[in-house]
Amino acid sequence: MFQGIGRFSVNRPWLVTLGWLVAAVALVVLAPQLKATSDQSEFLPSHYESVRAVSLQQEAFPQGRQPAAIAVFQRADGGKLTDADSKDVVEVASGLQAKDFPKVDKVVADPSAVSPDGKVALGYVLATTDTAYDQALVESVRKLREAVPGQLKGTELELGLTGPAATALDAQEGSSRTDAMIMMATLVLIVVLLLAIFRSPVIALLPVLIIWLVFLVAMGVIGIASDVTGLEASSSISAILIVVLFGVGTDYTLFLLFRYRENLRQEQQPKEALAAAAGRVGETIASAAGAVIVAFLALLLSSMGMLSNMGLSLALAVAVTLLAALTLVPAVFSLLGTKAFWPSKSWRKQPRHTLAERVGRLASRRAPIVAGVTGALLAVMAAGVLGFKAEYDSESSMNSELESVQAMQDMRHSFAAGQSDPTMVYVRAAGDASLDEEGLAEYRTALAGVDGVDTVSPAQLAETGDVARFSVVLDFRPTQDQAIDLVAGDLRETAHAAAPEATEQYVGGTTAVLADIRDAVNRDYALVFPVAALAIMVILALMLRSLVAPWFLMLSVGLGFGGTLGATVWVFQRGDDGLLFMLPVIVYLFVVAIGTDYNILMVARLREEIREGRDPREAAALAVKQSAPTIGAAAVILAGTFGVLMLAENSMLRQMGFAVAFGILLSAFVMATLLVPALTTLLGRKAWWPGNRAAPESPETGADPVDEEEREPLAPVRTP
């Protein structure tokens, strides 16, 4: 099949290229845009208590909205607010209210919302929409900010906007800047590295143009999936898509070009060499991409909408990249022929691969030592995983100079830490009964008695009289670990145990959402990890026709995962600060899936050498010599593209960039180049059972060779 696809693309390059161009234009014009959201509550299933609390809030208190944004007033000199300042606060709020911004219902100043130290007063931006992340509302917050300086003239006040809508605005603006920076840095990195490898400006620039076209097609496909399935992407998905598409796309292009150049050096004609390369590399690329795709699709099993949506988006993107690698890339290089390598002449010369040859000899001749040392190194790094601490505070990852972050810090200096976003407790009477005021007063007292609770508001009754709401201000920041532990533990337990009889109780709000997210993520760890590993092992077994090789390959990748996460803990985790709570899932999927790509390349070449009659030791040495340059070049480019995320303002993107880049380099230069060849040498012919009974065994392994009559013919699989 892959031979046929390769010949078709090489022999009809104009048709294939034109087809991709038409598809790209059509999708850019017709496909809907991705719907971005930062509202974490939308990512949880409906059975979680915090989500049910949101539903009850909308049903019982349709007009009782939480502020979409909070205006934090303080004097410019940092002193206490005077009576004149308090009047100015009201006038500023009234002036902003008069401007009538879309989706903004009211801008009000609360005379009672003055901090105990008298230094901060609060105003509230109430919206006409249920979600503070509505794009029109976020845009209105931008216009509110622009209008603030004019309203403050003649006063001694400063004003900063914070809260959900203001935070969403800052996150979007930061994401746009990050995307542009990451795109530029990624392009420069890929061009420079390709130029250094091939010494050809054509090859340095052409893959970037090809992958940009693939990026447009992939975004269109994801947009259609978004429209059909209701998919919503998190605010960071575009940055991740950029590095995945350009990184993986460059990798697959390199796999083809290295084999194409190898065939040209054997004096094959350009079209013949390219068609043969596309056919031989096709199965390897398809297997490698398949491992990545199934790993991403495993995220669909996540109870977190944020992860499942990300998994579907990335799987679709890699699938489009695979299709381009099998069709568009051969077609474009068929049009250019050997001119693609201009002005370099190095494609005509056989390389020495001196370093790769030495590494191959080391891995094959000192297999027990290499396997032991690399395994021990990975195990030592993996020990850092024991200190991993999940961080659920998304605000802590944002730039501290942003207005929403600074205003929130100013408010927390003067108010209780939880004042900005109270936890909401709802009580609903069963049936048609009404709630008893005396019982609600006792319930309020019980809630206020929980250690870590600052204040509890009096019960607010719904018009129907069967639902009451309490606003609970905590001593901790809403996204702080202590707040999450408190809500998930003592507060929820008290809310359920001390409630009036014949009632239902729900604890909601941001902190409750984060508590439920923590439970969901822990559940996902136990499900997504093994499913992804099992799916990848099935692909390896089918590709290698072996039941043994997948086990030691996944063992090596598992060690790489542990080593990667452990190293990230040591580099980034300081004091009470934790790491992105999704980091283990992301590292597992990227390192396991993409790291398996390099293992597939190496082990497929090992099998090829074995089938040509070489003993395991010789096969390992030759496989490393031939494959290590391809793996090394691909890994450096892919790791570089993910490493670009370390330039982002968001600390969580920086953590992700380091972890994935480090894991890819570890997979390529330690696991694929050293550990896997060493283990394969140690196992000998047993590594290929039951699909490679024709492989002769060297005297050093202690196994008997197989007679020619007993051998079964098997189709060779070649790799770059």
Image (spheres, helix red, strand yellow):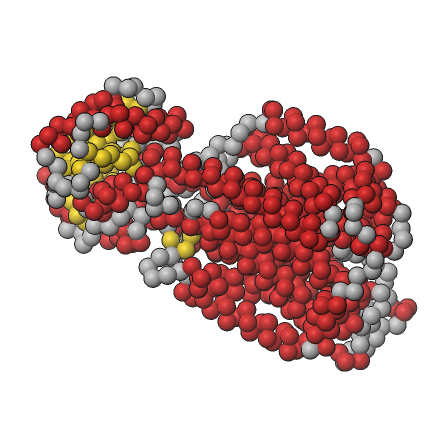
Give me the residue at 79% from left, 65% from top.
352
Residue 605 location, x and y as percent? 76, 61
Identified at 67% across, 38% down, the residue is 209
Q: Position of residue 699 (x, y in %)?
A: 80, 80
Q: Is residue 403 left or right of residue 223?
A: left
Q: Is residue 522 above or below residue 424?
A: below
**Image quadrant of residue 339?**
top right
Image x and y of residue 363, in percent:
69, 72
Q: What residue lies at 52% left-to-right and 70% top-to-bottom?
A: 379
Which image quarter is the N terminus in?
top right
The reply, left or right, for residue 188 in relation to residue 458 is right
Q: Residue at x 61, y 40 (%)?
A: 316
Residue 41 falls in image quadrant? top left
Whole-percent x, y for residue 333 in the image: 78, 41
Give the vertical position of 627 relative to 429 (above or below).
Answer: below
Number of numbered discs visible in the structure rendering: 0
Q: Is residue 46 visible?
A: no
Q: Is residue 477 left or right of residue 263?
A: left
Name the quarter where the C terminus is drawn: bottom right
Horizontal side, residue 151 vs residue 217: left or right: left
Residue 151 visible somewhere in the drawing: yes
